[in-house]
Amino acid sequence: MFTVLFWRATAERALRTAAQVLAATLGLDTLGLVHADWGDGFSLAGGAAVLAVLTAVAASGGRGEGPGLTETVKGRT
């Protein structure tokens, strides 16, 4: 958990999660299934990103190399 690779992988996961939530929120608004403006979408995306980071930290238990329960982060060569 205390490596640059862990935090890079965690940041990537949080950004990916935020983008997915924003796309889903605005897509559902476009389809008329929910009513959400850009502010609501960004609020939900930010909250999801924070939860993704907290999940990665909790899953690592302070001893894992990767942000997931079973993964390890490998540097790119």
Image (cartoon, rainbow, N blue to C red):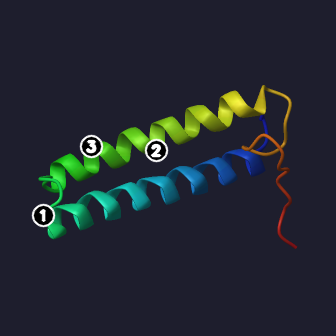
Front residue of 71/33: it is 33
Q: What residue is rendered at 11% in x and 53% in y?
A: 35
Q: Which quarter of the figure has residue 2? A: top right
Residue 66 marker = none
Measure how far apart labels 3 and 1 are at the Cα level: 19 Å
Question: Residues at badges 3 and 2 in contact (C-beta under 8 Å)?
Answer: no
Mark 2–mark 1 Cα distance, whole angstroms, equals: 25 Å
Mark 3 or mark 2: name the one nearer the start of the chain.
Answer: 3
Q: Amino acid at mark 3?
A: Ser
Nearer to us: label 2 or label 1:
1
Q: Position of residue 21 (x, y in %)?
A: 38, 55
Q: Amino acid at mark 1?
A: Gly
Along the viewing direction, whichever of 19 and 75 lies nearer the viewer: 19
Image location (x, y in percent) of residue 23? 33, 64
Badge 2 density bin: few <14, some 14–19, many ≥20, Cα 10 Å: many
Which quadrant does the N terminus fall into?
A: top right
Is residue 2 left or right of 11 when viewed as pictured? right
On residue 32, the disc is 1
Q: Give the residue drawn at x 84%, y 62%.
A: 75
Please name the residue shown 17% across and 69% down the image: 31
Q: Please indicate whether residue 31 sits to the left or right of residue 68 in the image.
A: left
- Look at label 2 and name its amino acid: Ala
Task: Tell which circle, 3 or 1, labels the residue nearer the N-terminal end.
Answer: 1
Give the distance between the C-alpha atoms of the residues marked 3 and 2, in whole angstroms.
Answer: 10 Å
Q: Residue at x 84, y 42 (%)?
A: 65
In the structure shown, which secondary structural element does the residue marked by tag 1 occupy? loop
Q: Which residue is mark 2?
A: 49
Q: Nearer the viewer, mark 3 or mark 1?
A: 1
Please give the residue where the numbered disc 3 appears in the rendered image: 43
For residue 49, side relative to residue 72 (left or right): left
